[in-house]
Image: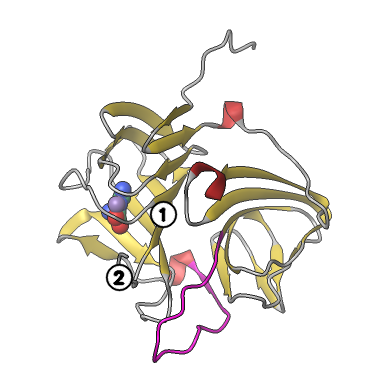
Amino acid sequence: MHSLGHTRSARRDDHLLHTPDTFVRASWPGMINAVAIVHVSPAIGAAFTQYTAELGADGYLPATSMQRFVYVLSGEAQVADASLGAGGFAYVPSGDVGAVRTRSGSRVAVIEKPYVALPGTSAPAMFTGHEAHQSPQPLNGDADLEVRALVPADASFDFAVNTMAYRPGAALPMVEVHVMEHGLLFLEGGGIYRLGDAWYPVTEGDFIYMAPWCPQWFGALGKVPAKYLIYKDWNRAAS
Ligand code: UGY
Ligand code: MN
């Protein structure tokens, strides 16, 4: 049905809510049977890029010169010699073999960022994993809010990617205001997200960008758990 000009998408100085009804798909040079929805990039002032790539049969997303994190949302995908199903993920360092291939089709969340070296440590190597195999940690002792770290707690990494799962009724214990920026993709369920001075109903498929110091809070609503994938810059001094 026609939207009659209405959408939940909203762009403010310190945040962006990007809902599926407003997604615009484009194919870039080098992509084969694939399109991307860019959710956030340096064009909005972010220090990273995040997009959803939708690959059809025999689809292909070329490698990039930046470090890349790939999370499979659905279907199957290959990164280097690793085969990933839904919930699988891969980290590929800068300038490495980060192309994504699929035989039968796949939807993948992709995060890219120029690597910031840390003197005394060497850049991380490629690794893969599966979200379900990462051990859940309660946030501040709250068993209703589980965090799974998908990137190792190792200072050589300059970003973190976590999933956060909220049982119905669970909420962040405080309004956070911090220097790190976030890219957030809703995987399941929904609730109310506070961003800046606005409160938004949010649900599966929505994307949120939070700029540095964007006030943020979330409470899960409904009968099923809410889960999101969240990126933040990490392990480097603010400068
Ligand atoms: O890691 C975080 O900063 C996380 N707690 N933020 C969020 O969920 N909005
Ligand atoms: Mn936060």
Looking at the rendered structure, the kind of residue marked 2 is Ala
Is residue 166 visible in the rendered structure shown here?
no
Q: Is 205 left, or right, of 98 in this rendering?
A: left
- Indicate if the residue with disc 1 has its beta carbon within 8 Å of ligand 1: yes
Secondary structure mostly seen in magenta is loop
Looking at the rendered structure, the kind of residue marked 1 is Ile
Colour scheme of the picture: secondary structure
Residue 94 rendering spot, x and y as whole percentages: 61, 75
Q: Quadrant of residue 217?
A: top left
Where does label 1 land, which residue? 230
For the record, the magenta segment spans 112-130
Residue 217 vertical placement versus 7 (above, below):
below
Q: Which quarter of the rendered picture does the N terminus lie within? A: top right
Residue 190 vs residue 25, the one in the foreground: 25
Residue 165 rendering spot, x and y as whole percentages: 34, 52
- Indicate if the residue with disc 2 has its beta carbon within 8 Å of ligand 1: no
Gap between marks 1 and 2, in whole Å? 20 Å
Q: Is residue 129 magenta?
A: yes
Q: Is residue 151 magenta?
A: no
Is residue 83 visible in the rendered structure shown here?
yes
Q: Which quarter of the rendered picture does the C terminus lie within? A: bottom left
Does dot 1 land on a helix, a strand or a loop? strand
